[in-house]
Image: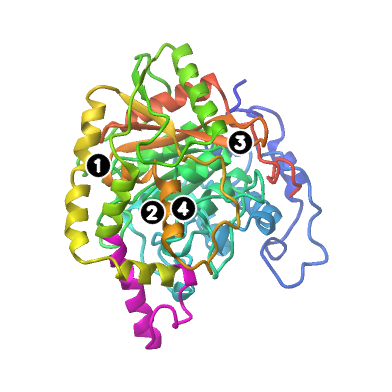
Amino acid sequence: MSGYDRGLGMPSRRSVLKNIIGTVSYAALVPAVAKPAQAAPKRSDEFIDYDALGMAELIKKGEISAREAVEITIRRIEAVEPIVNAITTRTYERAFEKAETISADTTFAGVPILIKDMIDVGGVRRTDGSRMMLSNIPAENVPYIDGVEAAGMNIIGMTNVPEFAQLGIITNNSAFGATRNPWDLSVSALGSSGGAAAAVASGMVPLAHGTDGGGSNRLPTGAQGLFGIKPSRARMLPGEAGGVHGPFKTNQAISRTVRDSAALFVHTEDPNGPFPTIGLVTGPSTNRLRIGFALTLDGGEPVHPAVAAAQENTAQLLRDLGHEVVEAAIPINASEFFTNFNGAFLGQFGVFSDQARAITGTNAMDSGLLDVFTASLIEYGSNIPADLQAAGLEYLATVPGLFTQVFSDVDLLLSPCMPFLSIDANALSPDTMVNESVVNFLQAGLSYTAPVNVSGHAAMSVPLNWDPETGLPIGSMFQTATGNDRLLYELAFELEEARPWKDRWAPYSCKYIPV
């Protein structure tokens, strides 16, 4: 019996469920000032080893109901959320209502999912991690969320992000606080999909939505032992209001298993986009690949020895699987890239200052609506000379061509996700004043991932290594040419079979914490 199907076919799944959730009422499951006296006792979660498709199969067989799947998920959230702080908005009532209407014939049959708090879900608060947005409730779904719900997923809440994603590599804000890494609470969950990754790593849900605008689905998954993918630009259904695509940001899953991500991909790729749809990928390819290995980055931060050892280990695994691994280089200089990136875009953050001024009549720093970090980043960007914007845009327009040249020689590019083994949870905070050293630190963390977003090609982080000294996960990043997303999934399936990671659980997770 495979790890995916653990427990399938065993008798009396419903009786097991009743032992877990008992007769607990909805009131006992939601946050409250005072806990109900008769709340159900905490027990081990007998369903924790199921991925989303495994849970969907139980619903399809009638062994649990979609409503019971919501109850299980609420129990998990309430057990570990006080520890990891991954949630900004709970949508429990909405999820219970939806559970009565989602067809069991859909792919996920009502399995709950958490959505990153940077996308419009109709009738659900979207805050972007900011106090300025606490009353923002979009009227309707964007197309990507329509695809998520058409897949049969039941939205049960929203996950934490840095304010407007500007804190970047660390998920922390003054509106909701810092999200903590379930593998080690003293290190960052990274970002900006830090809440989504922490929710999956802690076992709240097996699958969560994330967005990736500079590494946001790869950095947190690399740090938390999960699978994360950044599809090609415009591959997925639009995630912005009005049906438009962001210039760098794409949407897709963060998951414990490759097959969950691949199954959601089918429902969320855009049939009218610039690429032929790839459909459902169900396993590895027999084709052997030529894979470029780029351990270092010109002009970048030195790579931590544990990170370097992990990537060497990944390269050897690829050789053992019959792939050709050759030396390669990432085709940018990190310092040159970020000089031009900052010149092109940091000045545009002033839009948040304009919003704050419209509400309060004062500037960003004095408004009280924006974190000090965000306000000082706006000020930092406003001091960039205007003539650098045109030069920056001109340089960034050359980046896709640089990567096209690389992918004319290799099928894939292997590299670290970031040069650091980990980042201290308190390295940056909402009260950090942005200066040159802070910007340099942010850029070092994003140096391997952000160029991919500018180029628009596809990339993923795969959890193949854990540091033997600290026990922390170390992701390996793979990149491939724009539109070649299928190749990533096929390799991910192969790597998952060769070195399974699904059953490696974080210490602060529902695997070990009773629900």
Query: Which one is earlier in the sequence, the residue at label 4 or at label 3?
Result: 3
Instruction: Tell which of 155 and 504 is nearer to you.
Output: 504
The quadrant in which residue 364 appears is bottom left
Query: Which one is earlier in the sequence, the residue at label 1 or at label 2?
Result: 2
Q: Can the viewer see residue 276 in this picture?
A: no
Answer with left or right where residue 439 lies relative to residue 398: right
Q: Is residue 272 above or below residue 479?
A: below
- Predominant secondary structure, magenta span: helix
**Element type at mark 2:** helix
Q: Is residue 401 above or below residue 215?
A: above
Q: Which mark is residue 50?
A: 3
Q: x and y percent of residue 3 in the render?
A: 61, 26
Q: x and y percent of residue 178 in the render?
A: 59, 60
Report the residue marked by disc 1: 271
- The residue under the point 76% across, 43% down is 44
Is the residue under label 1 in contact with that under label 3 (CB below 8 Å)?
Answer: no
Q: Is residue 318 above or below residue 130?
A: above
Report the residue marked by disc 4: 441
Q: Is residue 428 above or below residue 501?
A: below
Instruction: Tell which of 478 and 485 is nearer to you.
Output: 478
Report the residue marked by disc 2: 145
**Element type at mark 1:** loop
Whole-Å distance between the Cαs marked 2 and 4?
34 Å
Query: Which one is earlier in the sequence, the residue at label 3 or at label 1?
Result: 3
